Image (cartoon, rainbow, N blue to C red):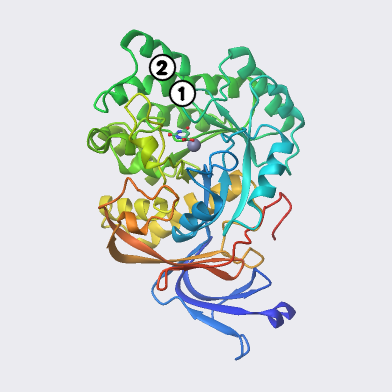
Amino acid sequence: MAELNSVELVVSARRLVTPQGVRAGVLHIGGGRILAVTDTDTAPAAVRRMDAGDAYVLPGLIDSHVHFRTPGLTHKEDWEHGSRAAAAGGVTTVLDMPNTVPPTLSPEAVREKAALIQGHSLVDHRFHIGVDPQRPELLAELDPGVATSAKIFMAGHHTAPTVVRDAAQLEKAFIAAAEGGVQLVLHAEDGELFSLLDGWWGEPDSYARYEAHRPRTGGIAAVAKVVELVRRHGARAHILHLSSAEEADLVSAARAAGLPLTFEVTGHHLSFTDADTKRLGARTRLSPAIRGQADQDRLWAALRAGLPSTLGSDHAPHTVAEKTRSVRQSPPGLPGVQELAVAVWTGMRRRWPEEDPDVAACRLARYLASGPAELFRLPGKGRLEAGADADLTLFSPDATWMLSAAQVYAKCGWSAYEGWTMTGEVLRTIRAGRVIWDRATRTFGAYDGRLLDSTAGG
Ligand code: DOR
Ligand code: ZN
């Protein structure tokens, strides 16, 4: 075990969440990696030590769906704030979305964005490149080093102007993605249907009517289209922020039949219902809209049955001034990277209080670490094992606390979860063996998060 000579940090825990399950053990860390996972502490006496006590030690969490708004929209969010929110939420890696100004539609734009972020992020990162509606065929040549995946917006709104509306262009994108072996991620709603409804009824002018104006039929129609395109062309497709029972059934059936189709569930679709949108208004105005209780129940059931591949926050902040515009003018989206893991943990403990917390912890690790790492091919990420990056999330499962605006690190300074009593707390977040969030002191680490490449890590 020559490697053990370079151990710099030892983390002892009663509850390490490993790919084989929860176990007591010791992580030997050096050079930013986990060098070994052992039963006992075999490191030299001089090495720094950390005792996680009763906290779960999860693999550093991965949020594969954030909008950190660089470039062009940094009045809403920037990487300092966004990555602080991530670190405080236990997240060590994010995948950022392309609906910026200008949009991230080319490898050059990705490189420019990466350069802007360097030195400003606490967390590791990669990107979803945007699909150019005028040139979807470019996907066939996309270098996998540039982006993990390519994002298609099938419906647009205030902050999502680059939409692939044309059926022929959409089909071209699937053909090119299949040819280039590119993973697609989709905002699958039927924008034409929404335009039709707005034409008939006028745009929504009250939050009581918001869901009806952006109904489930839009999602179901678009998901059906995606299923058919995947069936015909074979591209890998991941449906983002799936919001209704019917979509979950459709995607699950297609997947069971062998199609390379997966889906994401967001923290907010698990946490809120349309009744909250009536009360909270713009704060839970989202695209796709938050649906009813039955849909929320179905999404939780899907989670318990292991059906989604990832959980995402869709962290998409807007300023208070933007959110308090009239119903017609207010943009959809909320901050969520900080709240994601605790909100899901809170929901799991409340819904299934009899469940062994170790089972819940493994589920969290699967949806927020190994699942996204596998789907988006992030070597060295998502698993606590020898050779992996030393990204850890120390999570206290029983702590309860109330979320207030004062604790929000996103630049917008508000949260739809204000006033929620949370169960579970992120005590410490560690990236590459170094602390980037410490709950006791409310301090952060160094802004030297890495741009990951497809060959990085162990
Ligand atoms: O609610 C949303 N907000 N949905 C999206 O698809 C985009 C996001 C944003 O960027 O504001
Ligand atoms: Zn999004």
- Image coordinates of residue 64 in percent, x first then y, are 54, 45
Check disc 2 and report the residue beneath it: 194
Amino acid, disc 1: Glu
Amino acid, disc 2: Phe
Q: Nearer the viewer, residue 33 or 261?
A: 33
* Distance from the alpha carbon under mark 2 to that under mark 1: 9 Å
Look at the image and tell me in which quarter the N terminus lies: bottom right
Q: Is residue 212 above or below residue 447?
A: above
User: Residue 435 lies in what quarter of the image?
Assistant: bottom right
Please name the residue shown 54% across and 42% down the image: 69
- Whether residue 360 is visible to the viewer of this picture, yes or no, is yes
Q: Element at badge 2? A: helix
Q: Nearer the viewer, residue 137 or 458?
A: 137
Left or right: 122, with 14 as reference point: right
Left or right: 108, with 283 as reference point: right
Please name the residue shown 57% across and 83% down the image: 48
Check disc 1 and report the residue beneath it: 189
Residue at the farthest top position:
200
The label shown at residue 74 is none
| Circle 1 residues within 10 Å: few <14, some 14–19, many ≥20 | many
- Whether residue 41 is visible to the viewer of this picture, yes or no, is no
The answer to whether mark 1 is within 8 Å of ligand 1 is no
- Image coordinates of residue 187 in percent, x first then y, are 50, 29
Q: Nearer the viewer, residue 412 or 1?
A: 412
Q: Which callout, 2 or 1, points at the residue further toward the start of the chain?
A: 1
- Image coordinates of residue 113 in percent, x first then y, are 66, 44
* Contact (Cβ within 8 Å) of mark 2 with mark 1: yes
